[in-house]
Amino acid sequence: MDLKEAIRLRHSVRQYKDEPISEEHVSRLNEIIKQCNTESGLNMQLICNDPECFDVFLAHYGKFENAVNYIALIAKKSIDNREELAGYYGQRIVLEAQMMGLNTCWVAGTYGKKKCKADIADDEQLICVIAIGYGKDQGKPHLSKSIDKFCDMPVDKMPDWFREGVEAAMLAPTAINQQKFKISLVNDEAVIEAKRVPMAKIDLGIVRYNFEVYSSHKTR
Ligand SMILES: Cc1cc2nc3c(=O)[nH]c(=O)nc-3n(C[C@H](O)[C@H](O)[C@H](O)COP(=O)(O)O)c2cc1C
């Protein structure tokens, strides 16, 4: 599976097999996380075999099952664009995990923030977590708004790379599937903007990563 396929096949999975993540996968995940932390300045951490973080009423309501592993997305409070960075690098890890045969779910609300076992310094913030494990199934595609809700440009006027990037952005996970972003083509460059709604900055990073990987074009 390559990155493009991972973008198409990834869906949120909340029910996992009662099976620990293999040592090989743990060490590959830790390598990727380390690389992403070095590049971004984030302090993401993989926590395995912790049944408490998702043992909260909200998580049961959201139907999480055997969710005992997660990646905690942590950043220094002094990093201004920390939420967008967490989205961007978190999605890079999510897609790598998908390629390894693991499944994931971004979680900003339905978990016990205070129960998270990651090391978080006083000057740091836990932005959200990503549940990870071997899914009981592969999840299912989310409903999406139509392409004209994201771009003002008619589809037949879009360069191929831009249209493919937008389609990949539409496949990106967003909080409560809100898809509150706009993409425009300005001087041959894709410009992605998030609307001012909760969690939109995390979504923006995720959407940006999907767009860039699929289109092989950097965005602004
Ligand atoms: C920033 C963010 C926060 C999210 N928080 C939660 C959450 O608290 N609980 C939950 O069950 N799903 C959560 N999700 C998962 C979304 O509901 C899911 O990504 C969306 O419905 C699209 O579905 P898909 O991921 O299968 O494409 C979150 C997703 C994102 C991107």
Image (cartoon, rainbow, N blue to C red):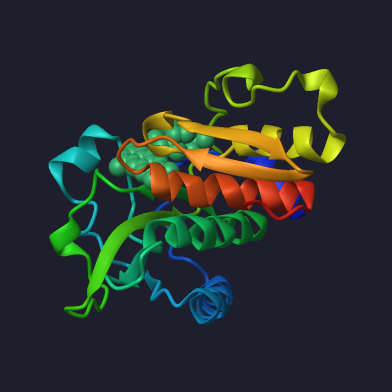
Q: Nearer the viewer, residue 97 or 107?
A: 107
Q: Residue at x 27, y 64 (%)?
A: 126
Side of 52 relative to 87 (left or right): left
Q: Quadrant of ligand 1?
A: top left
Side of 57 relative to 31 (left or right): left
Q: Nearer the viewer, residue 36 or 29?
A: 36
In the rendered image, the residue lying farthest to the front is 187
Image: 205 above or below 138: below
Q: Residue at x 69, y 43 (%)?
A: 190
Residue 22: x percent and y percent?
A: 52, 70
Q: Is residue 10 in view?
A: no
Q: Nearer the viewer, residue 60 or 152?
A: 152
Q: Nearer the viewer, residue 169 or 153?
A: 153
Total marks shown come to 0
Residue 217: x percent and y percent?
A: 76, 52
Side of 178 relative to 153 (left or right): left
Q: Residue at x 55, y 22 (%)?
A: 144
Residue 201: x percent and y percent?
A: 41, 48
Residue 82: x percent and y percent?
A: 38, 63
Image: 115 above or below 2: below
Q: Is residue 45 in view?
A: yes
